[in-house]
Amino acid sequence: MAFMFENLDVYQKAVDFIDQITSLTEQFPRGYYFLTNQLNRAALSIATNLAEGNGRFTKADRKNFFIIARGSAQECIPLLELSKRKQLIPESTIAKLRNQLETIAKMISGLIKGLENRKV
């Protein structure tokens, strides 16, 4: 039996994103642990905060975790930019990842807006 959040498209996209990020950062050379660690943590935070938010009972709690998830998606942007500048991830891959993050962030914004519009 699946948890409800596992059926959310945005959650699935977030898990796909962290899967791609972990595969990419495994290839980073020594000396870039700081970047590997922070990028993996920010990417993972998107999916985990979506999951945790869906487990909360109050609208305010749920909204807070969704806001954190959206912030984590935005946190990935400068980390990807640095990865590009250090030539750790090809520019074409960065563009695809940024597009995925934009989609994820918009979907999370939709979740937040949906919560705000709920009467209960």
Image: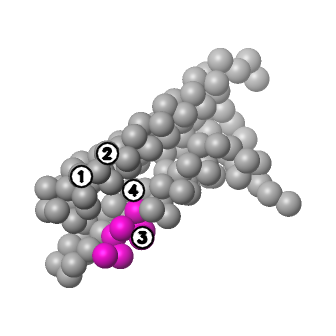
For mark 4, what is the residue? 42
Residue at the far left in the pictured view: 85
N-term mark: 4 or 2? 4
- The kind of residue tagged 3 is Ser
Q: Are marks 1 and 2 in contact (CB under 8 Å)?
A: yes
Marks 4 & 2, CB-CB < 8 Å contact: no
N-terminal-most mark, 4 or 1: 4
How many other residues sit within 10 Å of disc 4, few (<14), some (14-19) or many (≥20)?
many
What main secondary structure does the magenta stretch of the protein show? helix
Say how the picture is coloured. one colour
Magenta extent: 21-27
As measured in the structure, the alpha-carbon distance from the residue carrying label 3 to the one carrying label 1 is 16 Å
Label 2, on which residue? 95
Q: Tell me the mark number nearer the camera, choosing from 4 and 3.
A: 3
Q: Please give the name of the residue rendered at 64% of the width and 43% of the height, measured from the top-left corner.
A: 9
Give the label on residue 23, or none. 3
- Residue at disc 1, secondary structure: helix
Asked if residue 26 lies in the magenta stretch, the reply is yes
Q: Residues under labels 2 and 3: Cα distance? A: 17 Å
Q: CA distance from mark 4 to mark 2?
A: 18 Å
As drawn, the label of residue 91 is: 1
- The residue positioned 70% from the left and 21% from the top of the image is 118
Q: Is residue 108 above or below residue 24?
A: above
